[in-house]
Image (cartoon, helix red, strand yellow):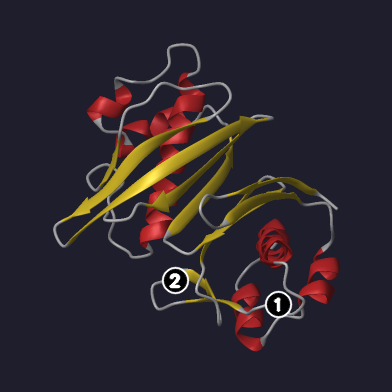
Amino acid sequence: MPLIKTERIVPAGEWGIWKIEESEAFFLDALGLRSLEVQQLATMKGRRRVEWLASRYLLHVLSGREDRADCLKDEFGKPYLVGSDYQISLSHSHGLAAVIAAPQAVGIDIQLEVSKIERIAHKYMRPEEMSSLSTTRRITHLHVYWGAKEALFKAYGRKEVDFKQHLHMEPFSLQENGGNFQGKLIKPDTEQSFRLSYRLFDSFVLVWCIEQEGG
């Protein structure tokens, strides 16, 4: 079973990564999609379909349940599990799927490192974040910041978020074994604080966030 990484969250929750080696037919048979899920899948083509299915399958595996809960989207497009108090987030990239579930707002992002991220850095990086970038692993560091902002955006679950204006990361030094830092979503009508964590492996960057109490 290609569940390649998993980690418990304190005090509650879990994230995991799945290496996608199965066919679309395998996931369709294993999941038994409901009508609304079938409608979502029908809007997708190619590899994205398999990645979408794999993320739902991983979510079910981590749940430990015998019967799978429907994974639908709310009015803003944020995924949720029917009949569950846990909040969830999903991501996929180049043959890997990642999910996270916890009682509070969470977000997760996984991505393969690519040099072209440098071209869009000015669109999402704040000056204080830019000044903290590693001189030897600048591209990796940019990916962690990007993943962090993607994760916060998913945890917030609403539209109209400017990654540069509204998402503020506490500058941090990049660590080879991964690490933690703080971030905030600040808008005129809301402010949320998050603890962020990241891992680096096989040219991939994984970042997840968990909303802090009182944030």
Amino acid on which disc 1 is placed: Arg
Percent from the top left, x then y, of residue 132?
33, 20
In this picture, residue 179 sits left or right of residue 121: right
Q: Is residue 80 above or below residue 106?
A: below
Residue at 37% in and 25% down:
172
Mark 2: secondary structure: loop
Pick whichever, 202 or 85, lies toward us: 85
Amino acid on which disc 2 is placed: Gly
Q: Which mark is residue 2?
A: none
Quadrant containing the C terminus is bottom left
Percent from the top left, x then y, of residue 128?
25, 26
In this picture, residue 7 sits left or right of residue 150: right
In this picture, residue 31 sits left or right of residue 203: right
Residue at 69% in and 64% down:
49
Q: Is residue 79 above or below residue 181?
A: below
Residue at 31% in and 38% down:
123
From mark 2 to mark 1, how far is it between C-alphas?
20 Å
Percent from the top left, x then y, of residue 62?
69, 61
Q: Residue extending furthest top?
A: 136
In this picture, residue 130 sits left or right of residue 110: left
Q: Earlier in the sequence, mark 2 or mark 1?
A: 1
* Circle 2 residue: 77
Pick whichever, 77 or 186, lies toward us: 186
Residue at 84% in and 61% down:
23
Mark 1: secondary structure: loop
Mark 2 or mark 1, whichever is nearer to me: 1
Residue 201 falls in image quadrant: top right
Pick whichever, 30 or 170, lies toward us: 170
Q: Residue extending furthest front?
A: 11
* Circle 1 residue: 68
Percent from the top left, x then y, of residue 3?
77, 50
Q: Residue extending furthest left?
A: 188
